[in-house]
Image: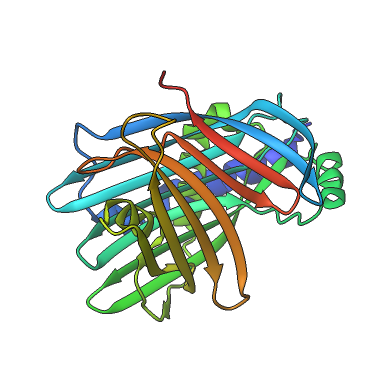
């Protein structure tokens, strides 16, 4: 339930930010033009125990991806989130947008501030979901002239802003982030951000690729292997990949399918293990 104090605190911060908001680093880049490729997804989830499926549920949320190129700038975006009405009240979302020209780039994104690593922790999180605010971690970065600058901020948004109000949530997070922007810090520069690195792997004619990418200033390794999958469609490519965090040596496997071409089509199916107990599948609903 929303209290008067909560509304006043959020409204005061939001209105103050409207007058003082600074542009995000990504805002200085050319905007998306017409003709962007876009695909929408339905999210399905499977809860596992020791890799044994316990329960599966379809349509627990959604997502979308887009790609466009103009003035030599490649713009990539991905968003995904749960529908609390179909996910037992769980409200989780993430969004990232990236722009790049050659080796220069900028990005902005946010993700729910939740790191449940076990089924028990996830169950406890469900019991806490009734709060008035949902917390996110928002990040931005910009690399130009051999220099990378990044910043990160904790953001609180009304819990009523769920996947069905995604555009309103993006506006809220952007406004909160830019109203009191965190200090930029410098970080080592190795490679491109994640979406750009993934797109490069899809475009690469080699069967196997290995690339470094940066996420919040941390180094990761992306390894991919591509094979034709005619059972899916005539020109379908199955990409099996592993993301490895260099600092922690943690590995996250995933698979995706797309239609081969120049440029390739956006993935029409994505499978990955979001948590040790949770498998997610994003499947195209474009027909």
Q: Nearer the viewer, residue 117 or 273?
A: 273
What colouring style does the render use?
rainbow
Q: Is residue 269 above or below residue 286?
A: below
Q: Position of residue 33 (x, y in %)?
A: 19, 37
Classify residue 9 as left or right of residue 234.
right
Classify residue 47 as left or right of residue 103.
right
Asked whether residue 16 appears in the rendered view, the answer is no
Q: Quadrant of the N terminus?
A: top right
Q: Is residue 152 above or below residue 75?
A: below
Q: Nearer the viewer, residue 231 or 33?
A: 231
The picture quadrant where one finds residue 113 is: bottom right
Q: Is residue 254 above or below residue 219?
A: above
Q: Quadrant of the C terminus?
A: top left
Asked whether residue 281 appears in the rendered view, the answer is yes
- Residue at figure coordinates x 27%, y 57% from the top left: 204
Residue ranking furthest to the left = 71
Residue ranking furthest to the top = 287
- Residue at figure coordinates x 19%, y 32% from the top left: 34
Q: Position of residue 109 (x, y in %)?
A: 47, 52
Q: Position of residue 176 (x, y in %)?
A: 51, 51
Q: Position of residue 247 (x, y in %)?
A: 58, 78
Q: Nearer the viewer, residue 97 or 149?
A: 97
The picture quadrant where one finds residue 101 is: bottom left
The total of numbered circles placed on residues is 0
């Amino acid at each position: 339930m929303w209290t008067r104090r909560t509304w006043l605190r959020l409204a005061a911060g939001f209105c103050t930010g409207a007058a003082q908001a600074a542009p995000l680093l990504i805002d200085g880049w050319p905007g998306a033009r017409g003709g962007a490729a876009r695909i929408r997804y339905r999210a399905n989830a499977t809860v596992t125990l020791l890799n044994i499926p316990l329960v599966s549920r379809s349509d627990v949320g959604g997502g979308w991806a887009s790609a466009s190129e103009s003035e030599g700038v490649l713009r990539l975006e991905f968003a995904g989130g749960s529908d609390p009405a179909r996910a037992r009240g769980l409200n989780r979302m993430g969004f990232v947008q990236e722009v790049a020209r050659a080796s220069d780039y900028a990005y902005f994104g946010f993700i729910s501030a939740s790191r449940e690593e076990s089924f028990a922790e996830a169950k406890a999180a469900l019991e806490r979901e009734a709060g008035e605010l949902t917390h996110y971690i928002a990040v931005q970065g910009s690399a130009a002239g051999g220099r990378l600058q990044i910043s990160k901020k904790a953001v609180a948004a009304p819990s009523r802003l769920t996947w069905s109000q995604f555009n309103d949530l993006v506006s809220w997070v952007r406004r909160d982030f830019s109203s009191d922007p965190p200090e930029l810090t410098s970080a080592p520069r190795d490679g491109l951000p994640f979406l750009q690195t993934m797109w490069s792997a899809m475009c690469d004619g080699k069967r196997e690729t290995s690339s470094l990418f940066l996420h919040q200033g941390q180094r990761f390794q992306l390894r991919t292997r591509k094979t034709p999958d005619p059972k899916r469609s005539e020109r379908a490519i199955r990409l099996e990949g592993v993301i490895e965090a260099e600092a922690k040596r943690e590995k996250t496997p995933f698979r995706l399918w797309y239609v081969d071409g120049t440029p390739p089509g956006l993935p029409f199916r994505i499978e990955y293990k979001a948590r040790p107990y949770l498998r997610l599948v994003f499947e195209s609903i474009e027909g």
